[in-house]
Image (tube, helix red, strand yellow):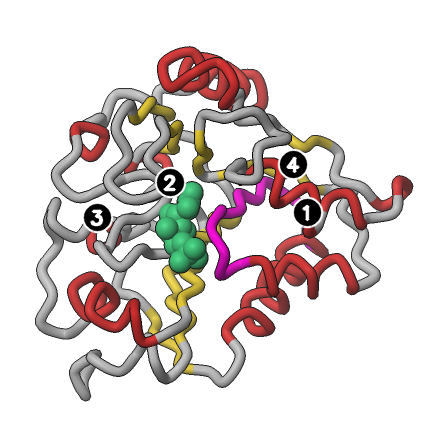
Amino acid sequence: MSAAIEVVADPAAAAAERIAAVVADGGHVALTGGSTPRGAYRRLAAMDLDWTGVDLWLGDDRCVPAADERSNEGMVRAELVDRIPADRAPRACHPTFGELGPDGAADAFEAELRRAFGTPAAPPALDLILLGIGPDAHTASLFPGKPALDVLDRWVVGVPEAGMEPYVPRVTLTLPVLNAAREVLFLVSGAGKADAVARAFGAGSRPGHDAPSSLVRPADGRLTVLLDEGAAARLDAAG
Ligand code: 6PG
């Protein structure tokens, strides 16, 4: 599945609109951490959406308590979940168990997925996974050259050494789960990401462990990359 590249003035607004459409249909939605999606989450919180048909997940987290400012779970709660009226709240907000450390969190997070999806041999097909991309082309907590990229027999894996700040252990969905999704949406903004975007999605790019985002290609799902002009600056004209 090739990526649909969309260069827009306000990627956060576009992402919020896309996520809102999936929320309306209901299903399993995994959000991302980092700073870029905050604007999208604040927009979603301001919409009068009914989240009661949604299981909310995170694609990855830092292994810190939810109250820690580095926690993705804590950020998503503050920017989105805690702003949704109780009668329209997600039917489940699944923790990432980051406080258990990378291995404990991976075991607990995977057990939570198996409880929600049963224990099929095939990875679960989430309805939408929102992802960001780092300047090193990492996504979720799948960093260039790190062992987690080779884990294909687990749904969740611990990452004892992050490849970028914050340098705390992580827990992350694995590539098989990302690529089983019905839809993957990358949300990227800023010229600082232009090189990573070109290495991951440019016409001349080749999937490889040096650019983990290039390995996210949902087998049967839709892949959309939302960019602003800065992030798209190094995409080939054909990209
Ligand atoms: C995280 C995210 C990570 C993030 C990228 C981009 O835990 O930080 O999962 O993959 O999406 O690092 O982060 P920014 O949006 O802050 O640039």
Choose the circle earlier in sequence order: 4 or 1: 1
Q: Nearer the viewer, residue 60 or 50?
A: 60
* Residue 117 position within the rendered picture, expressed as x and y whole percent measured from the top left: 53, 24
**How would you rate the neighbour count of disc 4 (Cα within 10 Å): few for under 14, some for 14-19, many for 20 or more?**
many
Q: Is residue 133 magenta?
A: no
The yes-or-no answer for disc 2 within 8 Å of ligand 1 is: yes
The residue carrying mark 4 is 55
| Contact check, label 4 and label 3, Cβ < 8 Å | no
Between marks 3 and 1 in the image, the one whose residue lies nearer the viewer: 3
* Residue 123 position within the rendered picture, expressed as x and y whole percent measured from the top left: 38, 29
| Contact check, label 2 and label 1, Cβ < 8 Å | no
**Element carrying mark 3:** helix
Residue at 36% in and 35% down: 177
| Contact check, label 4 and label 1, Cβ < 8 Å | no
Vertical relation: 139 (above or below) 66? below
Q: Amino acid at mark 4?
A: Asp
Residue lying furthest bottom: 237
Disc 3 and disc 1: Cα gap in Å? Answer: 29 Å
Visible residue check, residue 18: yes
Q: What's the magenta region?
A: 25-37
* Residue 35 position within the rendered picture, expressed as x and y whole percent measured from the top left: 50, 56
Does residue 51 appear to the left or right of 185 in the view shown?
right
Between marks 4 and 3 in the image, the one whose residue lies nearer the viewer: 3
**How would you rate the neighbour count of disc 1 (Cα within 10 Å): few for under 14, some for 14-19, many for 20 or more?**
some
Choose the circle earlier in sequence order: 3 or 1: 1
Choose the circle earlier in sequence order: 2 or 1: 1
The residue carrying mark 3 is 212
Q: Amino acid at mark 1?
A: Gly
Residue lying furthest right: 87
Choose the circle earlier in sequence order: 2 or 4: 4
The residue carrying mark 2 is 166
